[in-house]
Image: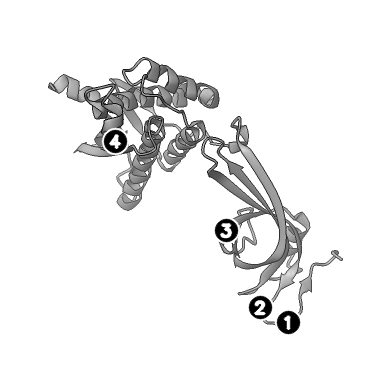
Amino acid sequence: MNKKEELKKNYSLTIEYNQEASSHQTFKNIASLMLAIDELNNAIAKSFSEEIETEAVIEEITSGSIKIWLRDKLKYIPDDKIKAYTNNPKEAIADLLIKIKHKIIKMLEEEPSQINQKTPKILSEEIEKSELKHIGYTIHKTKLLEAIGDLSHSAKSFEKKPIIEIEGEKMLIIDNYTFNPEEIEGIQKRTHTVRDKFIIKKPDIIGSSKWTIIFDKNIDVKIADENFIKQIRQRKISIAFGDMLDAELKIETYIDPDDMSIVETHYTITKVYGIVAPSNNTKQLPLKGIK
């Protein structure tokens, strides 16, 4: 492979950063961005086989603004299955990753509102133009859109948006797309409610952030009981270490119809009946106005 062909296989990230900013945070943000690129690569590659694994590897880092040259490396591929259709399956899939990633990131920059609708079509069209079209493929739409959402979200951490250059075109990675399972056609939603006593691990007394409670494991929950929040802020009730919420918890689970895997789970406290102290000898403290 000559130098010109090799450059086509590579792509670059350019990160402009404030030299007074924390180096630790800068490289942590870069690592998150690269993990998001890996996730997108894998979502594309698994159209051919669940066994395929990819990884974006660093080829070179230049000084000044941080410029990182990357290459998509296929860590594992079931060669025997694909070799019947192409002599070099790793190169064929790597080429496809570049082309599809290019189009997706361009759409993320210019047409984020069209991502849900157009992304599967882009994938299908590029595969049909390639020598891999005869292998047979399945587009995992939900995982693909989720990966794009993570890539977009990773750009939020940067003061100046990262620049990615693919096939000679420079594009910004912009935080303008949020993956929402409710907007994905075919997603299955299952809802159920339980009433129990949940240990309060991390409350949010002042703001509107989620609370952390223990329900078999640590979970972040939205508190939708406005009367409870009002009484907390007015200091009509207090919370101490080890206290529990006697409450109703609504659990909304989103299922990917492609493989029946769980995409996301949302937790909401819809009603709080009282605060329960950890001692067995202490009675439940009901909220005022609630019978």
Element assignment for label 3: strand
- Residue 14's place in the image compared with 276, above or below, is above
Query: What's the distance in space between the residues labelled 3 and 2, CA to CA?
Result: 19 Å
Q: Which mark is residue 237?
A: none
Element assignment for label 4: loop
The residue drawn where x is 44% and y is 32% is 174
- The residue pinned by badge 3 equals 219
- Nearest the eye: 263 or 270: 263
- Nearest the eye: 138 or 221: 138
Left or right, 263 with respect to 291, comes to left
Looking at the image, is mark 1 or mark 3 earlier in the sequence?
3
Classify mark 3: residues with Cα within 10 Å, few (<14), some (14-19) or many (20+): some
The residue drawn where x is 64% and y is 74% is 240
- Residue 270's place in the image compared with 263, above or below, is below
Looking at the image, is mark 1 or mark 4 earlier in the sequence?
4
Rendering quarter of residue 205: bottom right
Element assignment for label 2: loop
- Nearest the eye: 21 or 193: 193
* Residue 89 x/y as whole percent: 26, 27
- Residue 228's place in the image compared with 178, above or below, is below
Query: What's the distance in space between the residues labelled 2 and 1, CA to CA?
Result: 8 Å
- Nearest the eye: 96 or 7: 96
The residue drawn where x is 14% and y is 23% is 1
* Residue 150 x/y as whole percent: 46, 39
Q: Which mark is residue 77?
A: 4
- The residue pinned by badge 2 equals 278
- For badge 2, the amino acid type reads Pro
- For badge 4, the amino acid type reads Ile
Q: Which mark is residue 282?
A: 1
Looking at the image, is mark 3 or mark 2 earlier in the sequence?
3
Tell me whether the residue at label 2 lies in contact with that at label 1, contact meaning CB atoms closer than 8 angstroms: yes
